[in-house]
Amino acid sequence: MIFEIIVRDKKTRARLGKLKTFHGEINTPVFMPVGTQGAVKTLSPEEVEKVGAEIILSNTYHLFLRPGHEIVRKGGGLHKFMGWEKPILTDSGGYQVFSLARLRRIDEDGIYFNSHIDGTRYFYTPELVMEIQKSLGSDIIMPLDICLGYGASYWETKEALEITLRWLKRSIDYKNNSNMDHQLLFGIVQGGFYKELRKEAVERMLNIDLPGLALGGISVGEPKDKMYEIIDYTVSLLPEEKPRYLMGVGAPEDLVVGVSMGIDMFDCVLPTRLARHGVFYTSKGRKNIKNAQYKEDFSPLEEDCDCYTCRKFTKAYIRHLFLQHETFSYRLLTIHNLRFLFRLMENIRKSIREGRLEEFKKEFLTEYLRDDRENRLEKEELWSKLLI
Amino acid sequence: MIFEIIVRDKKTRARLGKLKTFHGEINTPVFMPVGTQGAVKTLSPEEVEKVGAEIILSNTYHLFLRPGHEIVRKGGGLHKFMGWEKPILTDSGGYQVFSLARLRRIDEDGIYFNSHIDGTRYFYTPELVMEIQKSLGSDIIMPLDICLGYGASYWETKEALEITLRWLKRSIDYKNNSNMDHQLLFGIVQGGFYKELRKEAVERMLNIDLPGLALGGISVGEPKDKMYEIIDYTVSLLPEEKPRYLMGVGAPEDLVVGVSMGIDMFDCVLPTRLARHGVFYTSKGRKNIKNAQYKEDFSPLEEDCDCYTCRKFTKAYIRHLFLQHETFSYRLLTIHNLRFLFRLMENIRKSIREGRLEEFKKEFLTEYLRDDRENRLEKEELWSKLLI
């Protein structure tokens, strides 16, 4: 059995599980840091492991463009190329083609697009995306899908879903004939923000033999209440026994809420990207190291944090380095933000084990929200709904 | 005794020594990596120690401007602020005022200048420079001096030397009355490229009680043969028993040549700065990771190097990260370049101990020069002079 559920929470849909992959076992619910170009930005593989990562995500689209999957293959596959021995999940690039590439044209065969780097024209097919991920050798792979923005019409969404489902079949066919047995191909549930389409997607995927199911087309510009609503609805349709991966979502509040809705896997660039903008997570919400109040603050980013950054450096020092554009400060903030999320995931898993996730969720969200004046009202309204 | 000479080379002026400072002992000849803003760019303190650094240099001018020495003092001094427990040398900022600041005006009291960051007007005096370095708490400190470019006239150079000598006395007076006994104040020998002025500088400093002497005003735009000539001449005048520090010089060839001329200490931004431009050192000269020949090169930067980068990553991977502007690649190249220099220093010290520095120098320079087509002819001429 690839996925094993160890504990089911009684009050929510949360589950504690173990997912077996070729490069090792993952404890779920799990957060996956993003290493877009074959490196989690600013960190060494050892540092990624040390903050608590059990699996990372890397981007098929980016590695296809640079350095090219052939080079990664010749280098012994992505694990060896980047010096990371634990599991890797690669996405399909569908989202990147949608968000980064220019002059897209989609037809039944695949997607034509111009590279966001140098404008070169490429043709992306479900088969090519499988071939790329075979070269990369990632443990969990994703099929090419069509990802639409928030606001796409019903018919546009339905057509995209139909193509996505046909592409899934082609991806499976390619995989079955390509000696890729050690790689786990997940299915991606699309359907936008139309519940009937999400339902149709799930129903038509139920009889396909897939080791896991992902929720795609989420966090594409919609308000957070719409996001939570469609996640909650879609997860309610999914089979119990398969791992559920919510693609591209992973703010601290999303992790807590998502797990309680039954999500097992998350990935998000937020902790690493925010770090490079000076933002760091604390249990009382996001803060920015550029803030003048930290000029002579000789305490760590967060008092009880066990990360390298907090054990060794003060806000005043990190602020100084950040303002002087010293890249070491990006690393220090990245380490802290990732460690914050992994400690959060550890607490979430512990809470599920102890049957008190609902209490933990309330405590965490109340505390995390408290000082966040930026969008306090909007969030309070949302949280009050979620906490009921 | 602060400085102890352990072995004197018989064929050259090289010496093997130990320099005692408040934060520990340094094995000379020593190379000091530069941590301008209170961090060796891209590296953690642990990484700096691991590549072999026994002492680092930090810049008084930069720390005075940002974050300000008062903040460093409140943070417990530079060692604590930046998390580095081994010795630190801080320069005086004289060179930075000369090379970075704008609208300089020098008078008997000090130097007026505009910050290179925001144009703020400052007034730098010998006393202020001592006060800053007291706040920083560095182990070896330097007095404010006047640093001129190559081509300065005799009279300009003589006047600068006179002021520098008077400022040295004021620096000593300040230090003696300021509870700074644990900090070692070196004298800076100026005099430009005029041998009689260098001679005068040394003679007038001989009767001053200083724990070490530095050669300043070198590597300021002169050709390399002029540089070596003035170093060689000046060192020949210096007392045997004091450590000699060649400021701002430290290309691999300079280290080997400088040691054989009797230099004990070097600092240079080259290994760290070059790394951020993709340049890496090898025993066969400098190479650039951007070069297309490394696209599918799955070997380390240098085959027999013991650094983290070479033990773990290939040129193809580092090249990919570098071309994608991933800051981790700057770190990987910085680690290698510093380790290259520290291995070179280890070999130099070993050669002195074994009485074969002259042979080592010939071997190293011949090999290091071989593939360097860029300025091969110019260098060959120079080396042929040096090797005779």
Image (cartoon, coloured by chain):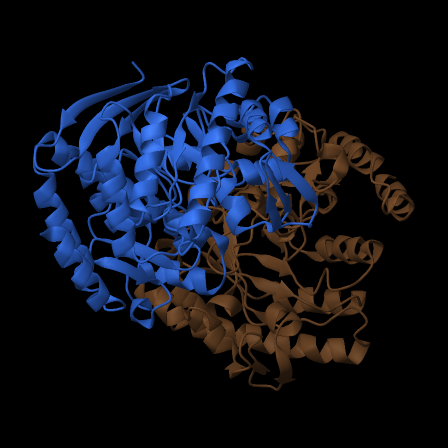
Chain colours: A brown, B blue
Quarter location, residue B5: top left
Give the residue displayed 11% in from the left and 52% down from the top.
B387
Quarter location, residue B360: top left
**Residue closest to the far front:** B155
**Looking at the image, is B306 positioned above or below residue A230?**
above
Q: Is residue A23 visible?
A: no
Give the residue displayed 67% in from the left and 45% down from the top.
A278
Q: In front here: B67 or A5?
A: B67
Q: In front here: B244 or A255?
A: B244
Looking at the rendered structure, the number of numbered marks drawn on it comes to: 0
Residue A197 image position (x, y, % from top left): 75, 70
The quadrant of the rendering that contains the N terminus of chain B is top left
Left or right, residue B136 beside residue A257: left
Residue A99 image position (x, y, % from top left): 66, 70
**Looking at the image, is A166 positioned above or below residue B269?**
below
Left or right, residue B137 beside residue B236: right
Left or right, residue A254 beside residue B364: right
Give the residue displayed 44% in from the left and 70% down from the top.
A132
Residue B270 image position (x, y, % from top left): 38, 50
Q: In front here: A73 or B57?
A: B57
**Looking at the image, is A320 positioned above or below residue B288?**
above
Residue B276 image position (x, y, % from top left): 44, 55
Q: Is residue A105 visible?
A: yes
